[in-house]
Image: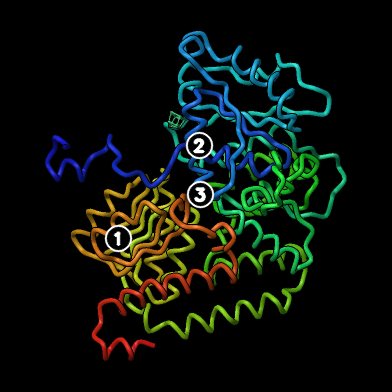
Amino acid sequence: MLDATPKEIYDRKALTINPAKTCQPVGAMYAALGVHNCLPHSHGSQGCCSFHRTILSRTYKEPAMASTSSFTEGASVFGGGSNIKTAVTNIWKLYDPDIIAVHTTCLSETIGDDLPTYINEMDIPEGKYVIHTNTPSYVGSHVTGFSNMVKGFINYLAKNNKTKNGKINVIPGFVSPADMREIKKILKAMDIPYIILPDTSGVLDAPTTGKFEMYPKGGTTIADIIDTGNSDMTIALGKVASEDPAVALEKKCKVPFKTLNAPIGIDATDNFVFELAKITGKQIPESLEEERGQLVDLMIDSYQYFNGKKVAIAGDPDLVISLTEFVISLGMIPKYVITGTPGEEFVRKVNAILAKAGIEGSKVKALGDLFDMHQWIKNESVDLIIGNSYCKYIAREENIPHVRFGFPIIDRYGHYYCPDFGYAGSIRLVEKISNAILDKIERECSEEDFEAVR
Ligand code: SF4
């Protein structure tokens, strides 16, 4: 029972209830799993590492391999130097990765562990690597952790050897393996040589072969990460998750970058495809034009069920910005839009999208939580909720259809094979949204009307 009035709870600054985010190391671990033969290493207590692995495994239904420095009371007082050196020695012997990607946890950040010095003092076998990034969880969110880990790979490995490789780097953001596959599909369809960093496809959506693979086939190779420094350009998909690593690569290797919105919905995907065509001079192939045409066809076919419907959206900032734009193009009204990740630019961007569409009276919040969204919905309800698995509690209590979107989705299967990105992903989103709305109409309408819903 909270000892506060409703107004105090509503205006609270120091308390989060039902967060719309998770902690930095989750994103860092996810990014490291997208590097081939890489073992993510959590520098902190076993409990932290177990939580990060669990949330990733529950989302993608695959083992999320990672090791830990296993802090106990001694490490908390005297520092985790000896723990991580012992851990790394054991990891080379037992698990033999090509690279260990270390991220910190709240405890190691609070005691101020000096990771660069520890790594310098390690005995690292020839041809192997240990890299690190700092991921204090009292700052940012899992999206920040993802960004920091990608930046860590670039800071340690990327090299400009003065010979251009003719490739485009793509930093995809904290998105599912299916979205990473979709980006690669578009690049291949346009015949564009690329390096995607990281790439969890083939790792967290790997097929069952009957044989356990500690390091599945997928993931960006170390050679490719080094080679990002020789690419013609970097495309950062989403400012929060992907721009910082692109800036780091520009500073280190003089590779220019462009930040684009995550390609969800027709406008953002058009922009991605047109920019690729402009940068590389490549044609947009018929296969993509056909998919785009199908998406437009579907949007027109189902428009009558979307027009004027109010929607509440919660999720990661880069994805929510594009999704807000997309639902407006479907004729819907984004009534409540929140992200758990801090950053007022999110609010500015979403408000600009709403203003451009002439939509007034919506509530937009960064560093918001699902309790905020629930209170807003109680005051004025919506027709649809789009957000991760935890939104289902609001949906059930308020009898509102719910479309699962973003991270984590722990109570559904197969979503990691189906993209939200690109024209193909947008078609899937329209299908999911229309099904959710139609299911509710059909559940609640009369026998005669049931037949009329087509
Ligand atoms: S202590 Fe910090 S790093 Fe560990 S699980 Fe909690 S928030 Fe994440």
Please state the horizontal and vertical placement of residue 313, each as a whole percent of the image.
37, 60
Taking the image as shown, residue 385 lies to the left or right of residue 398, namely right
SS category of the residue bearing label 2: helix
- Who comes first in sequence, dot 2 or dot 1? 2
- CA–CA distance between discs 3 and 2? 11 Å
The quarter of the rendered structure image containing the N terminus is top left
The quarter of the rendered structure image containing the C terminus is bottom left
Count residues near mark 3 (Cα–Cα under 10 Å), then give few for <14, some for 14-19, many for 20+.
many
Q: Ligand 1 closer than 8 Å to the CB at disc 2?
A: yes
**Which numbered dot is residue 395?**
1
Count residues near mark 2 (Cα–Cα under 10 Å), then give few for <14, some for 14-19, many for 20+.
many
As drawn, 220 above or below 43: below
Image quadrant assignment for residue 154: top right
Which residue is label 3 attached to? 59
Q: Residue at x 40, y 64 (%)?
A: 403
Q: Quick one: 248 or 15, which is closer to the camera?
A: 15
Q: Residue at x 34, y 63 (%)?
A: 385
Which residue is label 2 attached to? 52
Residue lying farthest left? 5
